[in-house]
Amino acid sequence: MLSEVLQQWLHKISNGLEPYRESNVVNVSLFLFGAYVAWSVWTFTILPKLQPDRPRVLPYWIPCHAISFFNDADGMFSYGRNYFKNTREPFAIIAAGETLYIITCVSAVSEVYRNIEQLTFDDYITDMMISFGASSKAIKTMWNPPSATLKRPEGAGPGKQALAHVAETLIRQQLQPGKNLDRLQDIFLNSVHRSMTWEHMASKAVLSSQQNMRTVSLLEWTREALLEGATEAFFGPTLLEIEPKLFESFFTFDDLSWKLTYRIPSPWSNDMKAAKATAQNALTRYFQMPKKQRPGACWLVETLETEMRAVDIEPVDIAAYLMMIYWVINANAWKVSFWMLAYLLHNPHLLTTIRDEISPILTAIQSPNELASSFNSTQTPRFLALYHEVLRLVTSSVSVRNIATPAYVGGKQLQPGGRVIIPYRQLLLNDEVFGGDAEAFNPERFLRDGSLSNNPSYRPYGGGTTYCPGRFLAKAEVLTCVAIATCKYDMEISHGSRIFPRLEVKKPCLGIMGPVEGDDVVVNIRRMAQ
């Protein structure tokens, strides 16, 4: 009886409080909405007027721009540029609590390149070393003041550079035109020539085979051929002997590498980490072996190893650094080859035109290095125009700088602690430079205007201190691969592969964009009568 009375009493109290609950919810909601409006007006309207020399922040809903940035970075860059009336002034976005200043104006990009004191690249290199698993001891050693006892390459004498900067010098010396590049490129291109033959074609690329015809995956064909060439040229034959599944693990890592770049935590990045570990462990075992048991490494690999061992950097950390280089070397060139051949196969008239232009050269020249140097705007203008146009359309590289002290770029003051981002796709698709059809495939634009490939907006390989040193080798391997496929084989798209592969523009990318997962070009090939 007492319990029933108590329950009835509590029920009445509860019913009596209901209006107050509803009123409180409404009041709290109104307060939060009012607070958001006040914050929004202050942040995006009033503050920019009080600080006109600061880049304006692209308006956002909480939580900042992170979701849009990770889902479609280039789409967000385009949205921001157009939101601010396409003035191409620097603007800011907020991602994961970090201020990123977006630079899309050519003159402002040049300012970034010139300002190497206030806008630095060193922190980004350190972040990448950490991401690749280098120990804190090794990272500290890489940035320590140099010891006079260390061997130094020409132009980087004792006392001038930390080992991290010496490594950059070594990379440039290996990959800039000269005897070091000639030797490396000769091995590389000979391997590509061999891998592209009928007899040595990668089995993974062949989907079906008849006596005189094969059906191949263009994606697998290009990437297997170029990765094999790069691995042999840089490390000799031993690395692949250590880990026969090296290519498989590397391709998986490359496809998922955006998770490393944007620091996606476990468990969502476990697949990427597992693939990276397989390739990186192979490199660790490689550097744990005596040198005499792993002949054939290029000058860069041998010299980097010598420099690192001289300051007691362990094989596991040498492997972490070389894994960074291996990734950069192999992540992009095969994609350019894939897209060039995809466009040719979907444009039979263009395929015939290019074949007619380069076949006489391929027949007359036997040396791989001489052949690569013959692909130029004088002897093969249409082939080079195709190369430039495809690069323009599929490049999504960015340059990153850390802001050490307040710096003016594009008339705006950038604040320390933030980062400068130069998204080159915003320059490469500029319709004021490349015409109203800038987003369409049209290699004729580079034939009509021979200076277009030197335009400041055409920067597929970046610029400044981070101007890609591997651009000469990349161009040689790409054009060699495409030329051999075009001139050594009769090629036609398989009946079930008539749809042009879609460009993967949504997945974060720091170089050349690949096709959407599952998209490919299935090709029927026959050996061409010589």
Image (tube, grey):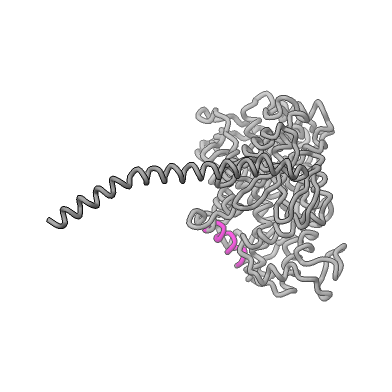
Q: Which quadrant of the figure has residue 346?
A: top right
- Front residue of this view, candidates 385 and 140: 140
Residue 212 is at least partly visible in this image: no
Residue 449 at x, y percent in the picture: 82, 28
175 vs 35: above or below: below
Q: Position of residue 485 (x, y in %)?
A: 66, 37
Q: Residue at x 59, y 29 (%)?
A: 492
Give the quadrant of the C terminus: top right
Provide the residue span drawn in magenta: 274-284
User: Percent x, y for residue 157?
Assistant: 87, 67
Lateral position of residue 95 relative to residue 386, left or right: left
Residue at image point 58% right, 55% down? 263
Res 317 quadrant in image: bottom right
The percent position of residue 323, horizontal first and vertical second, equals 64, 59
Q: Residue at x 22, y 51 (%)?
A: 9
Where does the N terminus fall, quadrant-wise?
A: bottom left
Residue 38 at least partly seen: yes
Q: Nearer the viewer, residue 435 or 123?
A: 123
| Relative horizontal placement of residue 490, taking residue 494 as reference (left or right) | right
